[in-house]
Image: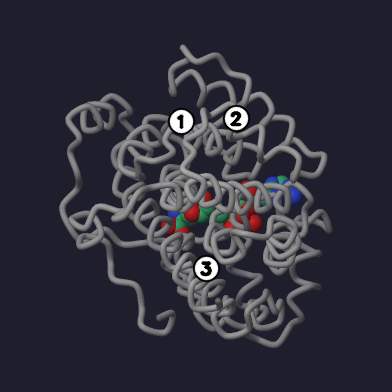
Amino acid sequence: SRHERLALAHLALDGLSLGDAFGDTFFGRPANPDAIRARIDARELANAPWPYTDDTQMALSLVAVLRDKGYVDQDELAASFAAHYEPGRKYGASMHGLLRGIQQGHPWREGATSQFEGQGSYGNGAAMRVAPLGAFFADQLDTVVEQATLSAEVTHAHPEAIAGAIAIAAATALAWQLRQDGLLPSRTEFIDLILPFLPESQVRNKARRARDISETTSVEAVAAMLGSGYAISAPDTVPFVLWCAGEGLGNYTEALWLTIRGMGDMDTTCAMVGGIVALSCPEPALPTTWLATREPLPTWVK
Ligand code: F2R
């Protein structure tokens, strides 16, 4: 039922926003990887509150549109992104102009397709917000692919950004399906299930590499091999996220501690991994003490 779908979308939203807020507490600190690694080794959490960023802010709109419409109404989604645009949430550079343009009445499609001299954005912003959509349509993978594409197009017209969104949404849906079946696959098996849904792209090629990396490889080496989002692009972020999610299925906090070791775009890698892995965990999926430290989500998405 719509009610059950929405409950799954909210679980993914909590997993995503908690990952986003957790990751952001490591991000932008003095650029000293050793200090960050020492905190990770000591499992040292930042003091409350943990503010969330653009990843969550845009995911809230997606959940609100799914709640109200039951599908991705692109005009509604664009309007919601613009209505809830908060410039201080650390959006990707091109989003400011795009969302201000929509606020001023410019058509979203024109804005999205004209980004970067007509290429469209291949940033990771379409993938970072999409896990709740994968959860909402978790029992229908073809619909996940179609609706993830529609949700991406509103801001990210580049095929790589769309492939990234499909990958994260499909991973979330599959995480839920596998849990329903009582299965906890290996990372290799998990990524193998995602690959058939991905269009030909760098994201897919690198996801295949993520599937095939040997079991003894450290997360730091994987981040160096695949990229962990320093370029904040979909191909530089999503394959690493699939590797981390595949390794961390069934254990939310360990999945995030693993992901954070990869450094890079930490709020966004953790948001994506958190959204996926939340759907794979036994209840309660998320640590209540961590949830209590995250900035509360606004009431308009309830
Ligand atoms: N690191 C950020 N945001 C920057 C924070 C700036 C500032 N310090 C602040 O505090 O406000 N994280 C956020 O950005 C990522 C999501 O980005 P999104 O939504 O995809 O944005 P954008 O600008 O479209 O793409 C990101 C960058 O990718 C490069 N790029 C994309 N398409 C390109 C193309 N066709 N050609 C060339 N370059 C392209 C550009 O550098 C874009 O700015 C998330 O990590 C989010 O948390």
- Tell me the SS state at disc 2: helix
Pointer 2 residue: 189
| Discs 1, 3 touching: Cβ within 8 Å | no
3D distance between C-alphas at marks 1 and 2: 11 Å
- Tell me the SS state at disc 3: helix
Point out the frontmost of discs 3 and 2.
2
Q: Reading the chain from its start, which is encountered first: label 3 or label 2? A: 3
Q: For the residue marked with disc 2, what is the amino acid?
A: Glu
Q: Reading the chain from its start, which is encountered first: label 1 or label 2? A: 2
Point out the frontmost of discs 1 and 2.
2
Q: Which residue is rendered at x = 38% and y = 38% of the image?
A: 255
Q: Residue furthest front?
A: 181
Pointer 3 residue: 58
- Quadrant where the C terminus sits is bottom left
Q: Reading the chain from its start, which is encountered first: label 1 or label 3? A: 3
Q: Is residue 226 left or right of residue 85?
A: right
Q: Position of residue 182 (x, y in %)?
A: 46, 43
**In the depicted structure, whether residue 212 falls above or below residue 230:** above
**In the depicted structure, whether residue 212 falls above or below residue 63:** above
Ligand 1 within 8 Å, label 1 CB: no
Mark 3 surroundings: few (<14), some (14-19) or many (≥20) residues within 10 A: many
Q: Position of residue 95 (x, y in %)?
A: 60, 65
**In the depicted structure, whether residue 35 falls above or below residue 297:** above
Pointer 1 residue: 247
Q: Is residue 288 left or right of residue 101?
A: left
Mark 2 surroundings: few (<14), some (14-19) or many (≥20) residues within 10 A: few
Picture disc at residue 79: none
